[in-house]
């Protein structure tokens, strides 16, 4: 179980990072797709952490993540369990409880020696806002130290997770 007070967004110091944004979800989707496509195109085998708020949002990218999964490293997918998926080796679903701080966040973190990227955002729109209209505040970064810090904290969150396969 994830600590309900854990927030990846709160680990970011907006005063020390240049790539702060306030954007709607379609642009975040585009940024994440660019990162995912880079992982696939370069065949980068790296552990990934991604939060979709609700697991049903993962359906749109399930095929792409199945391909990423073939690269052999664990993919950790966070979200409220509003749907279920067939278990796959290395594709790990971390269920969030309603009210967990991570339920209001959107992130993708990948830390490979040749490619470090993170999109970390917190939703600032009202609950119930349609997906394409949702507004997020966050950071897009390739700073290796920042990405490594985010990865270390996420690794602590998932360290006791036991997938059911």
Image (cartoon, rainbow, N blue to C red):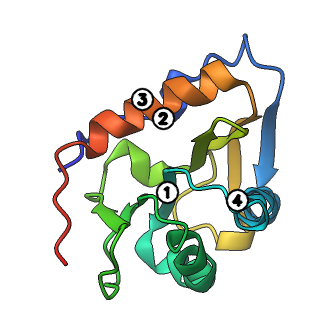
Badge 3 local density, few (<14 within 10 Å), some, or many (20+)? few
Where is residue 146 drawn, in percent x and y? 62, 23
Given contact means CB atoms under 8 Å apart, are the residues at marks 1 and 4 in contact? no
Q: Residue at x 82, y 59 (%)?
A: 27
* Image position of 110 with respect to 153: above or below: below
Given contact means CB atoms under 8 Å apart, are the residues at marks 1 and 3 in contact? no
Badge 1 local density, few (<14 within 10 Å), some, or many (20+)? many
Label located before the other in sequence (1 or 3): 1
94 relative position to 1: left or right: right
Of residues 7 and 153, which is closer to you in this image?
153
Label located before the other in sequence (1 or 4): 4
Asked whether residue 121 appears in the rendered view, the answer is: no
Asked whether residue 116 appears in the rendered view, the answer is: yes
* Image position of 10 with respect to 126: above or below: above
- Pointer 2 residue: 151
Of residues 114 and 126, which is closer to you in this image?
114
């Amino acid at each position: 179980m994830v600590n309900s007070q854990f927030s990846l967004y709160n680990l970011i110091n907006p005063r020390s990072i240049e790539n702060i944004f306030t954007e709607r979800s379609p642009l975040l989707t585009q940024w994440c797709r660019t990162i995912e496509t880079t992982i696939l195109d370069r065949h980068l085998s790296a552990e990934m952490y991604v939060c979709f708020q609700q697991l049903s949002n993962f359906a749109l990218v399930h095929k792409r993540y199945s391909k990423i999964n073939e690269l052999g490293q664990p993919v950790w997918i966070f979200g409220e369990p509003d749907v279920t998926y067939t278990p796959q080796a290395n594709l790990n679903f971390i269920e969030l409880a309603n009210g967990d701080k991570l339920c209001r966040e959107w992130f993708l973190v990948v830390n490979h020696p040749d490619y470090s990227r993170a999109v970390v955002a917190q939703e600032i729109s009202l609950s119930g806002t349609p997906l394409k209209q949702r507004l997020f505040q966050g950071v897009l970064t390739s700073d290796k130290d920042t990405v490594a810090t985010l990865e270390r904290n996420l690794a602590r969150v998932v360290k006791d997770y036991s997938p059911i396969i």
